[in-house]
Image (cartoon, rainbow, N blue to C red):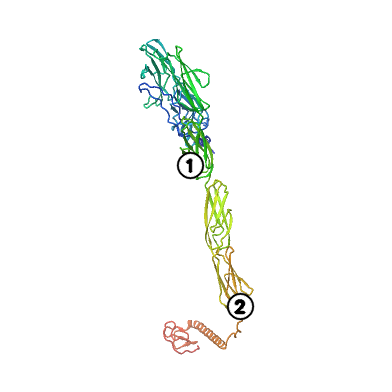
Amino acid sequence: MKFSTRTLALFLVLVLTLATLLVGGLSRVTVSPAPLVHPQSPSGTLAKGDAPASASLAPASQLTSVSPVVGRPHAPVLSAAGVSPAAVSLTWTATNDLFFANYTILVSTVGPSGPWSAVGVVATQSSTSFSTASLSPGAAYWWVVLEFNSFGSSSGSNVIQVNQPTLAYLTFTKPTSASADFNWTNNASYGGALGFVTYSLYEEKNASAPLLVATVVNPTTRTFTEGGLAGGAGYTFYLNTTECYSACGQGGEQLTTTQSNPVTFGTTFALGASLSATRNVVDTGESDLFTCNPSGGVAPYNYTWTFGSSTPAAGPGSESRAYSSPGPAGVSCEVTDSTSAHATAATTVSVNAAPSLTLTTNRTAADAGEGITFDCTPSLGTPPFVTGWSFGDGSPNGSSSASHSYTTAGRYVATCSAVDATDTQAAKSLSLTISPPLGISAGVSSAVVAPGTALHFTGQGRNGSGSYPTTSWSFGDGTVSAVANASHAYAVPGAFTSTFHVTDSNGIALSTTLTVQVRALTVVAAPLSSSTTTGHSMLFNATAAGGAGAPYNYSWTFGDGSVGYGANLHHAYASAGSYHPSVLVRDRLGATNSSALPAVSVTVPPPTPPLLSAFELLAIALLLGLLVALLAFARLRRTQSEELQSVAPWVPQTDPNRTVKGVKICRSCGTANLPIRSTCEACGADLPRWARRGP
């Protein structure tokens, strides 16, 4: 058999599609639609409101833990095209999934194994980039892209770690008393959707409002000289770096701005330092960003950090730190300027234990359609908490206590997710087994019965948990049975409603009813007569009704030792006397009832008279004589007819008075007629009244 090239191509497409669905089904994950909550960038002081502010993502309401499956033939390959202190631009290869639904971008702030949160969805298969801002400078993030198809399957890209660069660091030198040369760093890598916009240098003179003194549009230009400084004044400068991370140059672009450390010089102010933390309360494992801000003194500045009881260590103006143990944590920084002056600042951060969840439910096994209550109680962490449930069947609930019923049997995992006031996320799951809806069937051996007849009741549960520890019957007459297959007899007539109850091992109860009609068995019987003679067969009949119904069986005793069977039958008594017949009736289930008939009087009949009387014999003789005469007359007529037929052909038309062999000839038409006729049989003319036999 030969196959065309088109047929082979279609077959290969079908095979690849089935393989894609199979592999996609093995890596299926469910992603919460809630955005990730990122630590906000440190806020800086902006000049006269004209410097753009950093944007932050909305707080997440849920956390979804996933384990992305990496390495599918069509899985995306993820890379970071650009990164700056507060923003990142991601790009990946397009998939070849014929049933593409979307790309979902996940991030983790803990490690390459999650937990993960969804921060964006890209619905176009050829669109392979995503960017976001409001990230924490100096922090580490782990990113992955999931490609979902229209069947709900997904494939994950490689997991990449992106370390956000630290903030721009501003330094200066004073070539003259009236000028200052500024230099700064920029650790960003621009690419993808992330692009540079401007450097903005701000000046504060004698603690006045910030004034924009320079705007630099070339990212590689990182120096600026400010002249015309007033003698004897105190100056503070800082640098804002503005970047575009979406729709750059297209109008409506999205910008993010980060602020460098401030530098202060002049002789007006003594060297001072202040220390700020992004959060004053954090949970264990969560990073907090600390910034040491010098004031006064003579730049450049050097920084020395001490965290708790650790050894002091030199570092940049901003440091990020995560704590593994709860409790108060002290942080201090020491600033040293170019004149070797020192200033110290310190703060304390409250570190709470990471949030923990306690899950309770009224049942972990239930039938489909039955309500299950869920309760999620967070503890530790930093209240208040935002808590919600995901029940594993696509039905979320945004509260800590919820009630839910599953419509389809199967195994489900219900997950509670919580986010505390520090944006630390926690999740915990429990497994549930859902059985098909409980069913029930019941029957009885007969719906109609006579009192006292035992009936067999059968009951059975179906589906549910498959185990039915409790079954019972209520027969409607005040009696019950604790078995599914029971026997019961009703004592009195009436209509009774029997109810079968079943409860499965999930505690789900169900019942069904059936009706039994209990009817008294009645019999009416009588002989044809109350008296008879010996040897004479008389009719006996009986009619039964009620009970379990037909067929009815009739058994007769006639009082003379004889028995008979049937509703109607004959019986002859052999001897004279008074007899007491009775009949016993059985219905179709064996219930019986009897009826005693009135006494039958039997006498000997009188002698038999002669068979025929004299009058009867005479009448019979007369009848026999009449029969013989009729037979003779018939024979004579037949003979005359035969003679007429033999003479007629040759008899001529002659005188009608003439006869031939006693045959009359009609004078009108010449037809031969029998001598007994008075009119011609042919034309009806009168014939002579006499006749003679002869030639």
Q: Residue furthest top?
A: 176
Q: Residues within 10 Å of mark 1 (few under 14, many from 20)?
A: few
Q: Which residue is mark 2?
A: 578
The kind of residue on which mark 1 rests is Ser
x and y percentages locating residue 166 in the rendered image: 46, 21
Q: Which residue is mark 1?
A: 403
Displayed quadrant of residue 230: top left
Q: Looking at the picture, tell me which residue is in the foreground, 131 or 201.
A: 201
Question: Can residue 91 be seen in the rendering of this structure?
Answer: yes
Q: Are marks 1 and 2 in contact (CB under 8 Å)?
A: no
Question: Can residue 15 be seen in the rendering of this structure?
Answer: no
Front of the two marks 1 and 2: 1
Q: Can you say whether 483 is above or below 598 in the image?
A: above
50 lies left or right of 558: left
Which residue lies at the image location 63% right of the left edge and 73% below the top edge?
A: 562
Q: Looking at the picture, tell me which residue is in the foreground, 199 or 40.
A: 40
Q: Residues within 10 Å of mark 2 (few under 14, many from 20)?
A: some
